[in-house]
Amino acid sequence: MNGPVRLEEYLLVSAVLFVCGVACMATKRNAVGVLLGVELVLNGANLNLVAFSRYSGLALDGQIMALFVIVLAAAEAAVALAIALNFYNTHDTIDVDRGSKLQR
Amino acid sequence: MYTQAHAHIALLLTIAWLAPLASAAVCALAPVWTHRLSRWPAWGSLAGIAVSTVACLLARDTAEGSNKDLNATSGGGRYYELAHFGDIHLSIEYWIDPVTIAMFLLIAIVSLCVTVYASRYLDDELTEDYIDDEAPGLAEVHRPGRYSRFFAYLSFFEFAMFGLVLAGNLFQTFVFWELVGASSYLLIGFYHERPSANFAATKAFVMNRVGDAGFIVALAILLGTTGTLRLRSWDGTPGLLEWVHTHGMTPPLVLAGLGLLLASLSKSAQFPLQTWLRDAMAGPTPVSALVHSATMVAAGIYLLARCQPLLSTEVLLIAAYLGAATTLIGGAMAVVATDLKQALADSTVSQLGYMLLAVGLAAPSLGLFHLVTHAVLKALLFLSAGSVIIACHHEQRLAALGGLRRKLPWSAGLMLVGVLSISGLAIPTFGWSDEPLALAGYYSKDAILTQSLAFGQVNPQHGLLYAVPLITASLTALSMFRLWFLVFAGDPREPELFEQAHESPRAMLAPMLLLAAGTAFIAYGGLHSHLFHWLQAGSPELHTQATAYRWPDLDVFQGAQATAGQHAFAAALTGVGLAILLFGIRWIDPQEIARVSGGVTRFLNSGWQLDACYRYAVVGPVHVLAGAVRYIDERWIDAAIQVVVDRCLAAARWDRQIEEHVINDSVRGLERWTWKLSDWARRLQNGHLRHYVMWIGVSVVVLYYGVVLLTWNARGALPRPSQGVSGTNTTWAGESLARARHKDSLISGLG
């Protein structure tokens, strides 16, 4: 904690967020929980983008890209929720383990 | 004009030579174009030989009509050259002179008669089921008849015989010599289900091979010494006879002469190779008539007569003595023969001895004269014997025949003509004409005896050469008349056989009639006859080398003629008289004589024990050698091969083990592992969403680090960004940092 905050610390935080998101996606049985994981992944990437925009020659490019990502995340969340709704309509459950029609 | 006549004669004789080959092919293919019971094969063979006869008659007219000198149209030519090795040429050639034409006529006419005769004689082959019960001690054999095959063989024999006479060089003669021997083998062994026939055919062929060895040696010596194998040449190059005339006799030629003598001894059944002719009677009677009395056995004499100048005087003398000995051997065997055809075979051997004697006394034309007359009358005798055999259902033993003159009058009469001819009887004319009235056999035998007497007068130490044939002349008369009396005269010895005997059909009698006419008129006039004129025209001159023996000149010959004629006549009368006494009126009983001289009879009947000699001397050792070779083959060679075989089998078995266990197992193992791998890989796709997500994450990380690792060394090659404003820090992070500070300083500068 000595001196100003460096780039590496931001990257660490975003990595932690990313990993948490991936872990959430991989382990949650609830479909909404998987979507939460997706959000976490996207936000971790956002944080990464902003940190690079502050500490390197990206200037405002990273922040613009983060805005885009936020918008896209919102759109994607809507679509994902629609899929989850459809999933519920067909399988009568939100448990992803039960929907194993992808099995060979 | 002469060359054109010669070309005509050559063409006619070529047609005569090849026509029987065509008919042989036609008869051989008879199963294709006709059925087993048809007589057409006989007509086919007859057509071939008829063409030959017509061609020969036309050739004779051409040769005779154009001039008085018969030798003017002589000549040779080449049909086709087979090969040449430097100066040595092997070709198919021909040589035609009056002797050739005369021999062609003889062969053609006798073959014609025999073919006509055989077309009826072999009637019992016209059946689907021929019952052969003639092999004593064996069961009956049932087989289909083979009429067409006989005529195929017969025509092939005629082709080979014509070719032998027509041959222009000795190699070609040898080729046809072998072909004649081969067709004789086929014809003797015609009834090949009988062991006797098989044995006889093999014996004939093997004994002829002995002579062939001599022939081949002679051919080699002649070719090596003189460079040619033509007897008389037509294109300027010297033939063998011209070579001998210019160079004289050399030691190699003596050997060659011995080889040729050996060849003719075997082919013409002379002592010591005469035993095969008796056994050759196992063939059908037409075969005996044509092959083994008239033509094939005469081939040896013909060869020697043609080659006579090539033989040195020693060889000729050996030939003369062998001939004289053979006459006695054959004649004695004929007197005690118990079988009809066997008696005729022994008499053939005897008469061939006369011919060999004539050639040995340097009078080949006399030998050929006797050859022609003997061919005609022996064929007649065999054909009449055949009609007796057919009438008595193939009964050949003299002990079973008798009194057949009442049942077979024509056969008896014609056979009597033949017997008279061979006995050499004549009716003296007491000055009415130069020559007595006689049948053909008298003239030729008389001429030979004259020559031997003349020779004996000039060289007194060789008197035996006259005495022995003279004694044999009486033996011949005795044996032939004995034969006639035993078959036709007296009372039948087996009445049931006698009852069903009947005369032969006209088709069989007509040829016999023709031959009887031939034997009556063919040699009328003896040495002044037309026939002898022909035979003498082609004969080579005597060679005039200085020798230890003097050849009789013509005046000696003519002086001896009267004496020899009287002696011969007396000998013949003695023989006939004895025959009448013993067998005609039976004043002395021949059975008594046989009982008293039993040992001699047995000795003679066994062929002077010559067969036994051969059995001990030749056949026995060959069997021993064959046994030894067989032992080696079975015990050693076969055992060695068996070892190799066993090793191969073991190797094969081992190879199979490898294939089954190693290869198959490895392939199956591979198959099993592939299944296991696929089973494991299948578990990746289990349909669980969270597993898929986890795998995505894992693979992203792995891929990222993989890329970093792979491009780690290439990092140095990455393009560096250009120098920044401050120029101190060249990394792009540093450069943007410198720009940010620059902006800060601008902003702070403004504010």
Image (cartoon, coloured by chain):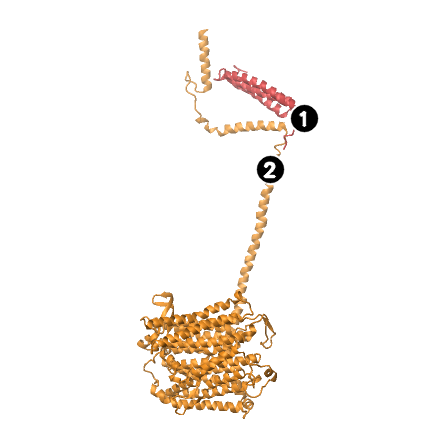
Tell which chain the image draws in orange: B
x, y (%) of residue B130? 58, 72
For residue A91, which numbered disc appears in the image?
1
Q: Can you tell which quarter of the image residue A89 is in?
A: top right
Q: Would you place residue B346 above or below residue A99 in this image? A: below
Which of B136 and A62 lies nearest the eye of the viewer?
A: B136
| Chain A on-screen colour | red
Q: Looking at numbered disc 1 in the image, what kind of residue is underneath it?
A: His
Dot 1: within a 10 Å radius of its alpha carbon, few (fewer than 14), some, or many (20 or more) residues?
few
Q: Quadrant of residue B317?
A: bottom left
Give the quarter of the figure containing the C terminus of chain A. Answer: top right
Asked whether residue B250 appears in the rendered view, the answer is no
Can you say whether B160 is above or below B524 in the image? above
Vertically, is B186 above or below A33? below
The residue wearing badge 2 is B678
Q: Which quarter of the rendering shows the N terminus of chain A?
A: top right
Q: Nearer the viewer, mark 2 or mark 1?
A: 1
Exactly how many numbered labels are in the figure? 2
Q: What element does badge 2 sit on?
A: helix
